[in-house]
Image: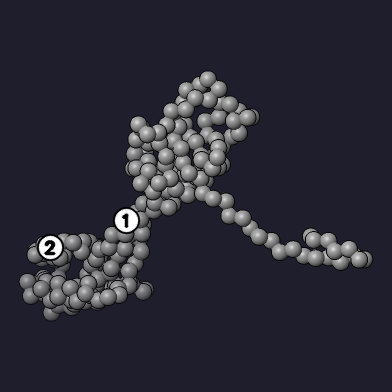
Amino acid sequence: MNRLGVKIYENAWGYEVYAVFMRDISSKRVSIELYILSPEGEMSDLMTVKICDFVTKRNCMDFLFSQEGSFTRDDIDSIKCQIASLIKKEKNSFVDTQNKATMQEIYRALTAYIEENAEELTDNPNASIFIRDNYGYMETKLLKFFIRAFKEELGFSRVEILKRLKIMGVLLPAKDRPYDMPMKIEGRQIKCYRVVMPEKVSVETACEVLTIGKEEICA
């Protein structure tokens, strides 16, 4: 079994303390996860220490007094010194985790959803999702279906998604609206979210020249 983490301390009773530097991909927050390995090889649950707490709170490690292993103040002070030394290192090996989608993943998921469900207004003037001039339009009432379909992958609420898309500059509301824009299509009034669609990447293909008699044909 290859456990992750760096052994930073072992007390007089044989209890070992390990530290793992964690990084959340979506939020970019970093933290330290500690766990204790007993002399019998049993691993404790993870104990999270925020780096900001470690720097600003004097007693941020006192929870170790409640852990099996009879840790003393001297033990805890030694553990803190080791963690401080690791934090000062220019390069630490981070273990990546992800609780929620990144900003780019939210955008990719929504634009893919629009592309898959868009209809041509010429074919269906009542279309609730359509693409025009490289903008994707979705009636506001349909966003709940997108969130429901990608709830586990995204992990954000409606307002959280809209706020992030707006800050990214890909959600373009009307001037007097926070997120949506009123539209009139074929006499019907609707409210839509207008999203900048990603540019299509053109794929260049090599031209294979075939010679047939005296003619050259590009295939």
In x, y percent, where is residue 43?
26, 68
* Badge 2 density bin: few <14, some 14–19, many ≥20, Cα 10 Å: few
* 64 with respect to 169 (left or right): left
The circle on residue 17 is none
* Point 55% across, 22% down: residue: 186
Amino acid beneath label 2: Thr
In x, y percent, where is residue 182?
43, 28
In x, y percent, where is residue 155?
37, 47
Task: Please name whichever residue, 156 or 42, is drawn nearer the observer in this view of the structure.
Answer: 156
* Point 25% across, 63% down: residue: 31
User: Mark 2 or mark 1, which has the lower sequence index?
Assistant: 1
**Residue 78 visible:** yes
The residue wearing badge 2 is: 56
Q: How is the image coloured?
A: one colour
Task: Please name whichever residue, 64 or 95, is drawn nearer the observer in this view of the structure.
Answer: 95
Secondary-structure class at tag 2: helix
* 46 with respect to 200 (left or right): left
Amino acid beneath label 1: Ser
The residue wearing badge 1 is: 27
In x, y percent, where is residue 198?
51, 49
Q: Quadrant of the N terminus?
A: bottom left
Looking at the image, residue 127 lies above or below residue 65? above
